[in-house]
Image (spheres, rainbow, N blue to C red):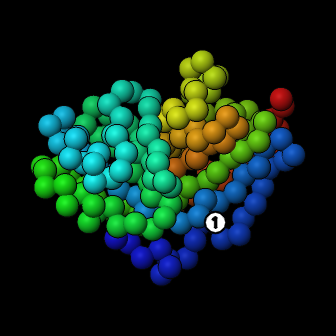
Amino acid sequence: MADQALRKAPLGRSHGGSAGARVTPAAPATRLSLRAGADALGALSSVFGLTLPTRPKTSASANGRHALWLGPDEWLLIDETGADLVAAAVSAGVLHSATDVSHRNAAVLVSGPDAAGAIASACPLDLGNAVFPVGAAARTVLGKIEIVLLRSGEEDYRVECWRSFAPYAFGILAEGAEDAVL
């Protein structure tokens, strides 16, 4: 598990946005890139304390932990409590690949009534309620970078990106929040 306390936060105390859409850095989290076959899902779901989603554009969340479906055998797990996800994966006793990507990723939170508009200013994904409801997750682009987007609430989104792109993602989201219109 990566020790988040040893790493300088890529966004520091950044803040941005507008009255309609707030843009803030997410707190440090443990992240795991997980690959596994269908036969391992039951045991892995059990040790992670949530059912790994198996349908495109879905996620599962429980007790500060999120599992985002990225492909037929691929998930991104995010734990906001500091738990050791690699140790949990090992304890499942089934064939899988688990890589701690905590130091690779950073996240930006976008919230408020104009949050979808702020993200849509640089992301081609349709964020309408019918197409991207609460709990939806997808790998997509924001400006010129790849992101993983999670809709965590009615007006709340989590934008996961590579750490080196975090200032760019934050800047483009803050600018989009200033321009967003209800």
Q: Quadrant of the C terminus?
A: top right
The part of the image, by quadrant, that contains residue 59 is top left
Left or right of 43 in this view: 133: right
Q: Residue furthest bottom?
A: 6
Please indicate, yes or no, whether residue 52 appears anywhere in the rendered image.
yes
The part of the image, by quadrant, that contains residue 165 is bottom right
Please indicate, yes or no, whether residue 124 appears anywhere in the rendered image.
no
Residue 82 x, y percent position in the rendering: 45, 68
Residue 12 x, y percent position in the rendering: 66, 71
Q: How many marks?
A: 1
Left or right of 98 in this view: 126: right
Question: In the image shown, does 81 or 4 lie closer to the viewer?
Answer: 81
Question: Does 145 sit above or below residue 53?
Answer: below
Residue located 33% across and 61% down the image: 85
Q: Quadrant of the N terminus?
A: bottom left
Left or right of 54 in this view: 63: right
Q: Secondary structure at mark 1?
A: loop
Q: Residue furthest top?
A: 130
Residue 161 x, y percent position in the rendering: 50, 51
Q: Please, what is the three-letter code of the amino acid marked with disc 1?
A: Leu
Residue located 48% across and 35% down the image: 137
Rate crowding at label 1 as few (under 14), some (14 to 19) or many (20 or more) other CA atoms within 10 Å. Answer: some
Left or right of 158 in this view: 32: left
Residue located 84% across and 31% down the image: 181
Question: In the image shown, does 152 or 11 lie closer to the viewer?
Answer: 152
Which residue is disc 1 drawn over? 11
Residue located 17% across and 42% down the image: 40
Residue 176 x, y percent position in the rendering: 75, 41
